[in-house]
Image: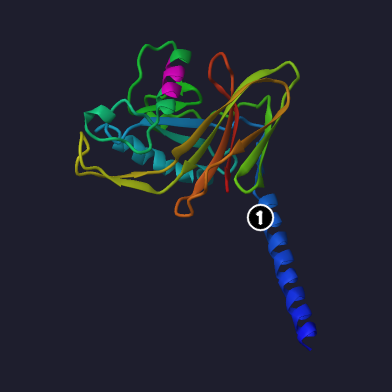
């Protein structure tokens, strides 16, 4: 009897493990997306918790969480808030800022033949966007296509389809919503700041020609914050996005 019970318990345990494995596989397989035939808009905010003029831009960016529902016939924009570190010296260190974000802003400035970087700066589809409420929603036909999916755990892949002679560059970002900070020094001392689309991981994906598959290993997911995996393809000469895709996973 003892052997029979042990066998039954073992079979039940194996059944539970198999079921769990199937569920995990199904979740991984369902976390996937494909780009449309139109170029998805890309919005970049360069901001800092040490900049007193940045909070209004941060608040405006948060309104874009509903951009997809406002126009269901158009792709929802890929939105990213790059926190830069060059205002940290004022007295408050922005915990979301990295030198890599500042370097990206400098590259955007170089593509635009501009000799300055500033905050808050909003870049829409690769161009400086002074009037935030009039960002370009014009839908251009895309020359490349992206299939984005979760492979296993924190590994994501992007399959790019393009003409063999087409040159392109790409980068990944991982963004999170729902962050906040109680600022205790600097220009925003005493303010309670809220942030969405915060870039928590930024990784250049190199230069390519024709179709290719690229892979990203993400950091551990924070369950307290909605996470988006973003993949952006751009013209290496101008920085203009050629296609982009965002995956909530």
Q: Nearer the viewer, residue 225 or 99?
A: 99
Q: Does residue 124 sit above or below 149 in this rendering? A: above
Residue 152 position in % (x across, y down): 66, 47
- The answer to which image quadrant residue 243 occupies is top right
Quadrant location of residue 72? top right
| Image quadrant occupied by the N terminus | bottom right
For image coordinates 75% across by 80% down, the residue present is 6
- For the image, the number of numbered tags is 1
* Residue 47 visible to an observer of this rendering: yes
Residue at 49 percent of width and 28 percent of height? 136
Relative side of 88 to 46, left or right: left
Horizontal and vertical percent for residue 232? Answer: 58, 30
Q: Please state which of residues 131 and 194 is positioned toward the viewer in this rendering.
A: 194
What residue span does the magenta drawing correspond to?
103-109
Q: Residue at x 72, y 60 (%)?
A: 22
> Residue 199 placed where, x, y %?
45, 37
Residue bearing mark 1: 27
Q: Is residue 22 within the magenta segment? A: no
- Residue that lies at the very extreme toward the bottom in this rendered image: 1
Which residue is at the front of the view, 7 or 148? Answer: 7
Most common SS among magenta residues: helix
SS class, disc 1: helix
Q: Is residue 108 magenta?
A: yes
Residue 105 falls in which quadrant of the image? Answer: top left
Residue 216 is situated, as x and y percent measured from the top left of the image, at 61, 36
Viewer-nearest residue: 134 or 173: 173
| View extreme (front): residue | 2
Q: Is residue 27 above or below residue 217?
A: below
**Crowd tier of the residue under label 1, counting other residues whose Cα lies within 10 Å: few below 14, some 14–19, many 20 or above:** some
Q: Relative to residue 5, is residue 32 drawn left or right?
A: left
The colour scheme applied to this rendered structure is: rainbow
Is residue 128 at least partly visible in the picture?
no
């Amino acid at each position: 009897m003892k052997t029979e019970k042990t066998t039954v318990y073992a079979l039940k345990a194996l059944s539970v493990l198999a079921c769990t494995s199937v569920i995990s596989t199904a979740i991984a397989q369902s976390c996937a997306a494909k780009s449309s035939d139109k170029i998805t808009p890309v919005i970049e905010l360069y901001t800092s918790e040490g900049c007193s003029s940045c909070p209004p831009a941060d608040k405006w960016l948060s309104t874009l969480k509903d951009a997809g529902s406002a126009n269901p016939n158009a792709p929802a924009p890929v939105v990213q808030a790059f926190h830069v570190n060059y205002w940290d010296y004022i007295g408050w260190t922005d915990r979301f800022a990295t030198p890599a974000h500042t370097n990206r802003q400098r590259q955007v400035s170089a593509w635009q033949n501009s000799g300055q970087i500033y905050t808050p700066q909003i870049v829409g589809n690769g161009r400086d966007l002074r009037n935030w409420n009039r960002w370009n929603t014009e839908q251009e036909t895309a020359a490349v296509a992206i299939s984005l999916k979760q492979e296993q755990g924190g590994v994501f892949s992007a399959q790019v389809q393009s003409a063999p002679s087409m040159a392109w560059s790409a980068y990944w970002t991982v963004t999170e919503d729902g962050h906040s900070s109680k600022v205790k020094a600097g220009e925003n001392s005493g303010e309670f700041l809220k942030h969405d689309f915060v870039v928590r991981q930024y990784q250049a994906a190199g230069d390519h020609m024709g179709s290719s598959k690229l892979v990203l290993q993400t950091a551990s997911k924070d369950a307290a914050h909605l996470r988006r995996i973003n993949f952006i393809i751009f013209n290496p000469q101008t920085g203009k996005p050629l296609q982009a895709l965002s995956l909530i996973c």
